[in-house]
Image (cartoon, coloured by chain):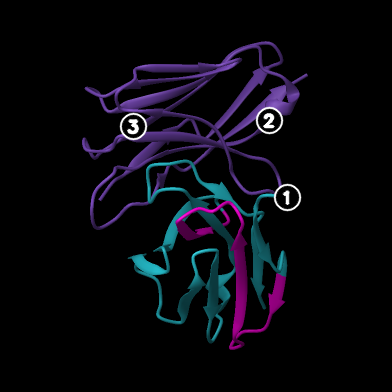
Chain colours: A purple, B cyan
Amino acid sequence: GENVEQHPSTLSVQEGDSAVIKCTYSDSASNYFPWYKQELGKGPQLIIDIRSNVGEKKDQRIAVTLNKTAKHFSLHITETQPEDSAVYFCAASKSEDTGRRALTFGSGTRLQVQP
Amino acid sequence: DTAVSQTPKYLVTQMGNDKSIKCEQNLGHDTMYWYKQDSKKFLKIMFSYNNKELIINETVPNRFSPKSPDKAHLNLHINSLELGDSAVYFCASSRHAGTSGYTFGSGTRLTVV
């Protein structure tokens, strides 16, 4: 089955700096890669996603890049703010007619933005 | 409000008891999921239903039994609770199985004492 590895497990940056979180996946058939933000005491919330027919996607201060050949994708947050502090999860899945069709999550990155 | 709502938010119970967690979504999604988040924050799929049909049943003890009376509801019943069942359980839904964004509920923190 799919295996998603995520690094780093913790990341501390100064306010205004950029943060990068990286993930690798094992199943070359995976074609959907979302990122989730989980704040304390809440459920994960989708912040951006990318499909395998696209190499990069941007939404204001966040961007995601995908390298299908290397089977890795990254989350980039620019001009970080204290409210960006949270746990971030990457995930991967594939569309198929039968069988497993659910997201496999990475192990999470705890991002701390220091004011 | 459109959302995925799960109840209860907190559940403290003794070993050996049976408990249920309920989940409802009003987003019109076809697929619903149960995920378990352990103390290290790792999210692991347990079950998935698509239009009331079970499509994923991961290797979880058969003390855990999901039930989907209709595509807007997915409940989780746990028999003979054990200490190791303590975790946060998240319900989620998506428009399509696997390849569209999930909307998560706010979680149920289960503590078995």
Q: Secondary structure at mark 2?
A: loop
Residue drawn at (55%, 72%), measured in percent from left and top? B75
Amino acid at circle 2: Ser
Where in the figure is residue A97, as x and y percent of width and height?
Answer: 23, 52
Residue drawn at (66%, 17%), measured in percent from left and top? A80
Q: Let me know if marks 3 and 1 both belong to one chain.
A: no
Amino acid at circle 1: Asp
For mark 3, name the chain: A
Q: Secondary structure at mark 1?
A: loop
First to last magenta residue range: B11-39
| Magenta span contains residue B13 | yes
Residue wearing tag 1: B1
Left or right: residue B58 compared with residue B35: left
Upstream in the sequence, badge 3 or badge 2?
3
Where, quadrant-wise, is the C terminus of chain B in this rendering? bottom right
As measured in the structure, the alpha-carbon distance from the residue carrying label 3 to the one carrying label 2 is 22 Å
Closer to viewer: mark 2 or mark 1: 1
As measured in the structure, the alpha-carbon distance from the residue carrying label 3 to the one carrying label 1 is 36 Å
* Closer to the camera in the image, B9 or B110: B9
Residue A24, label in figure: 3
Where in the figure is residue A111, as x and y percent of width and height?
Answer: 62, 30
Residue wearing tag 2: A85
Q: Let me know if marks 3 and 2 both belong to one chain.
A: yes
